[in-house]
Image: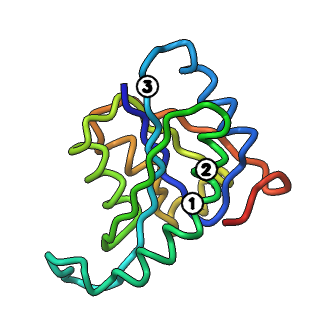
């Protein structure tokens, strides 16, 4: 079983461990930490080599977190992708990667008025992926900045 964990610049380690502990009894599951580098353009090149520097920098930022998860006895992989939006990148990876679950870490819930002006990444992922999506609200005081 494969679990996708999209991460941005902040990670609540305690909440992520809490979420992953649900799966610990299942033998042979793997966790893929996934980060999307957003490219704000209408088109995106097929060859991502022009973004190699950004991908390399992001990987180096995420590597300590990946190593920390492995030290907690989780089979962990790291993947960095380039997409026009975070939601689009997560949806593409989730639908093409054969994942059973996605664990989304939300920073805050938005009120009805805020929802009119802000598109939720989590909501887009829930609506457009084929696998189960688990959401957790993270505490900003306990987050680990990458």
Q: Which residue is mark 2?
A: 67
Question: Is 127 in front, or is 130?
Answer: 130
Image quadrant in which the C terminus is located: bottom right
The image shows residue 27 at horizontal and vertical percentages of 46, 15
Residue under the point 38% across and 47% down: 125
The residue sitting at 21% across, 45% down in the picture is 96
Task: Report which residue position mark 3 lands on.
Answer: 29
Percent position of residue 143, x then y? 76, 55
Q: Are marks 2 and 1 in contact (CB under 8 Å)?
A: yes
Location of residue 21 with respect to 134 vertically, above or below: above
18 or 47: nearer the eye?
47
- Of label 1 and label 3, which has the lower sequence position? 3
Q: Count neighbours of disc 1 (C-alpha within 10 A) and say few if under 14, some if 14 to 19, many if 20 or more.
A: some
User: Residue tagged by mark 1?
Assistant: 63
Q: Looking at the rendering, which quadrant does residue 49 occupy?
A: bottom left
Badge 2 or badge 3: first in the primary sequence: 3
């Amino acid at each position: 079983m494969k679990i996708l964990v999209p991460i941005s610049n902040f990670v609540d380690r305690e909440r992520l461990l809490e979420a992953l502990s649900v799966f610990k009894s299942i033998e042979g599951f793997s966790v893929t930490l996934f980060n999307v580098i957003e490219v704000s353009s209408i088109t995106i090149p097929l060859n991502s080599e022009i973004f190699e520097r950004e991908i390399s920098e992001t990987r180096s930022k995420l590597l300590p977190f990946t190593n920390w998860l492995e030290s907690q006895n989780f089979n962990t992989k790291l993947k960095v992708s380039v997409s026009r939006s975070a939601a689009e990148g997560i949806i593409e990876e989730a639908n093409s990667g054969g994942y059973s679950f996605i664990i989304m870490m939300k920073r805050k819930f938005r009120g009805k008025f805020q929802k009119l002006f802000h598109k939720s990444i989590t909501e887009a992922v829930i609506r457009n992926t084929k696998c189960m999506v688990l959401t957790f609200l993270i505490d900003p005081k306990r987050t680990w900045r990458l």
